[in-house]
């Protein structure tokens, strides 16, 4: 098993187990991250995002993952996250493909890709179904996610 594979296993099992300090150990201090909900994050924002998501779900996140390819510097992972979202506790099943770039066994860049319209249909019901495909709603989702993260970081 390569150092990249060890890091990938540690990351996804730590998310599933709510082991926040172990998640932090997977990332370089200068990490860059992107996904359709949070947009671009960097540095300490990345592990704080995972911490916020874990705490808001009270550790009730189920993760299944498969490493599609991996070498010492790059990895591609398909993972499925199952959790509840929002005040209505809607059930979410999100299929994500992550492209990870590593250096010295730490993640320096991560790009998560998933269908935000499918996610918004699950998260917001009818309004997500009708509007989740629009740039306007996707921008609002991202703005709200970033505000939530900034507030979480301030109070953590």
Image (cartoon, rainbow, N blue to C red):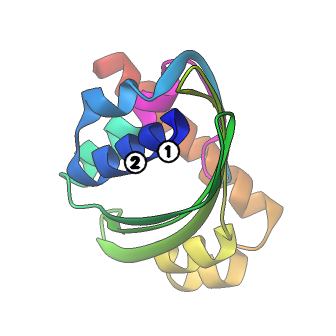
Q: Which residue is at 50% across, 30% downward?
A: 46
The answer to whether the residues at label 2 and label 1 have Cβ atoms under 8 Å apart is: yes
> 20 or 88, which lies in front?
20
Q: In which quarter of the image is residue 96?
A: bottom right
- Residue at mark 2: 9
Number of dots carrying numbers:
2
Q: Is residue 123 above or below residue 121?
A: above
| 2 in the magenta segment | no
Mark 1 is surrounded, within 10 Å at the Cα level, by few (under 14), some (14 to 19) or many (20 or more) other residues, namely some
Name which quarter of the figure residue 100 lies in: top right
Helix, strand or loop at label 2? It is helix
Task: Give the vertical position of 68 relative to 131 (above or below).
Answer: above
Q: Does residue 39 show up magenta in the picture?
A: yes
Image quarter in which the C terminus is found: top left
Image spot of residue 70 (x, y percent): 63, 49
Farthest residue in the left direction? 58
Point out the stretch of residues depicted in magenta: 37-49
Q: Is residue 4 above or below residue 141?
A: above
Name the residue located 68 percent from the left edge and 53 percent from the top edge. Answer: 36
Left or right of 60? Residue 71 is: right
Q: Which of 101 and 19 is in front in this view?
A: 101
Which is more toward the observer, 148 or 39? 39
């Amino acid at each position: 098993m390569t150092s990249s594979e060890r890091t990938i296993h540690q990351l996804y099992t730590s998310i599933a187990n709510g082991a926040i300090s172990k998640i932090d150990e997977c990332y370089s201090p200068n990490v860059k991250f992107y996904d359709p909900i949070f947009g671009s994050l960097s540095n300490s924002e990345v592990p704080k995002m995972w911490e916020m998501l874990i705490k808001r779900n009270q550790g009730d996140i189920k993760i299944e993952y498969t490493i599609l390819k991996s070498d010492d510097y790059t990895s591609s992972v398909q993972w499925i996250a199952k959790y509840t979202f929002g005040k209505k506790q809607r059930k979410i099943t999100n299929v994500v493909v992550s492209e990870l770039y590593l250096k010295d066994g730490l993640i320096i860049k991560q790009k998560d890709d998933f269908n935000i319209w499918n996610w918004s249909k699950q998260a917001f019901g009818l309004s997500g179904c009708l509007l989740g495909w629009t740039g306007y709603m996707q921008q609002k989702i991202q703005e709200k996610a970033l505000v939530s993260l900034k507030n979480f970081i301030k109070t953590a």
